[in-house]
Image (tube, rainbow, N blue to C red):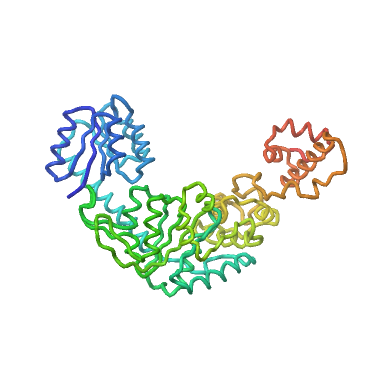
Amino acid sequence: MGKRILVIDDEEFIRMNLKNIFDSEGYAVDLKENGTKGLDALTQNEYDLAFLDINLPDINGLEILKQIKTEQPELLVIIITGFSSVESAVDALKLGAYDYIKKPFKADAIKLITKLALETQQLKQKVKKLEVRQKSPLGIDSIVGESEQVLHLKTLITEYAKHDATTVLITGESGTGKELIASSIHSLSPRAAKPYIEINCASIPEQLLESELFGFERGAFTDAKERKIGLFEAANGGTIFLDEIGELSLGLQAKLLRVIENNKIRRLGSNKDLDNDIRIISATNKDLKKAIDEKEFRKDLYYRLNVLRINVPSLRERGNDILLLANYFLNIFRQKFGKDIIGFDKEAESTLLNYGWPGNVRELKNVMERTCILQKEKIILKKNLAVDSLMNMKKDSFLNEEDLNFELKSYDEILSDIEVKLINKALALSNMNVSETARLLKIPRETLRYKIAKFNLSPQSD
């Protein structure tokens, strides 16, 4: 069957018993007698399943489980526990363990739980591959906005789509919708009927990414039991979108450069080149020129990827598009959650427009979802908006250039004037509420009250 299982247990009898069971089923098995050796094995090899004793002499089994779930979240872990440790096994399930089995156990029980776990793992892998390969690209109509920046963006997308053999580099802050731009280019291009494949270069461990991109021949490495078609090959004739291209290792950058230059790929373990007709669209929120200076990104690859360039504007640059998007997402979520919500009041709209949106469209979508879930009334007020921090306002929300045009005064007088302007701005944003103003300015409420009295300001009581 070619499946590989890791057993981490300090009892030799348990280890050998499991080995005999797995050998009889045709599984490959590695045995480790403590947590340290088990973790070492996990960094050096790929496993389909792990059996982990909850009580080990060197490292607590729950700590090992946490590390596995952090570094290899897809690996299924079955906890081995004694009768007295069932409570700990339940804790392990909460941390992400697949199941647990109590000592002493029977061979049939081990065979059954192993079979079910491996079938679950195989199903997860199939679903994941299907999601990657079958994802339907969204068109340009899914880009919501009427601002000058968005209209220019749509013009570039339409023009770039025509040149379907030319690379495109999409830049912009995280959450601006770079993947939506890429899929729009594909959907408008002559390649629209061909495959469109997205892959996030930061989401797959480096040692696995090469085999995902290029595929491999049977026997190329220890666990290569059969030939696998890589994503470049699967996308032949269509488009591949490489998100977070700045996270690609230098070794893979060199191989990607050869793909672009030669229009050929080679599976791992093969000596034969395959013709490959794909359009490569890449995206990053990193400064690639800085990465080049720091020897983290190849200059020759940068120029190959950057033939056509699109910089996606941040949400805070798009003006009233913020309200268009807010209402767009609100409509989606009120239908999803069955809420009778009409819209926003003027003050809530003003807050949305003045918030800095560091997470851009992705953050706005999340805020609308949280707001919709918590909303009870038909109209969303400012206090109902589930934004993370009112401090994240646009840079001119508190002070602008005019605020700093002081006539010649002493240093203390200038500081006092600035302080008054800051407090007045914050009071206005918080509807003259002292407690909210203190939170906004990140100062103790008593300190704020002292300054209000000192400068003879007039907030409402809280």
Rendered location of residue 122, percent (x, y): 26, 52
Rendered location of residue 388, percent (x, y): 59, 45
Q: Nearer the viewer, residue 254 or 330?
A: 254
Rendered location of residue 243, percent (x, y): 45, 56
Relative to 155, is 250 above or below? above
Q: Quadrant of the C terminus?
A: top right
Rendered location of residue 173, percent (x, y): 55, 54
Q: Nearer the viewer, residue 181 or 257?
A: 257
For the view shown, which residue lies furthest in the right direction? 408
- Where residue 218 sits, quadrant-wise, is bottom left
Horizontal arrangement in the rendering, residue 165 relative to residue 158 (left or right): left
- Where residue 310 sits, quadrant-wise, is bottom right
Q: How many numbered dots are placed on residues in this image?
A: 0
Horizontal arrangement in the rendering, residue 27 relative to residue 75 (left or right): left
Q: Nearer the viewer, residue 298 or 388?
A: 298
Horizontal arrangement in the rendering, residue 362 relative to residue 206 (left or right): right
Task: Name the residue: 33% across, 28% down.
Answer: 60
Q: Nearer the viewer, residue 357 or 405?
A: 405
Horizontal arrangement in the rendering, residue 392 relative to residue 399 (left or right): left
For the view shown, which residue lies furthest in the left direction? 24
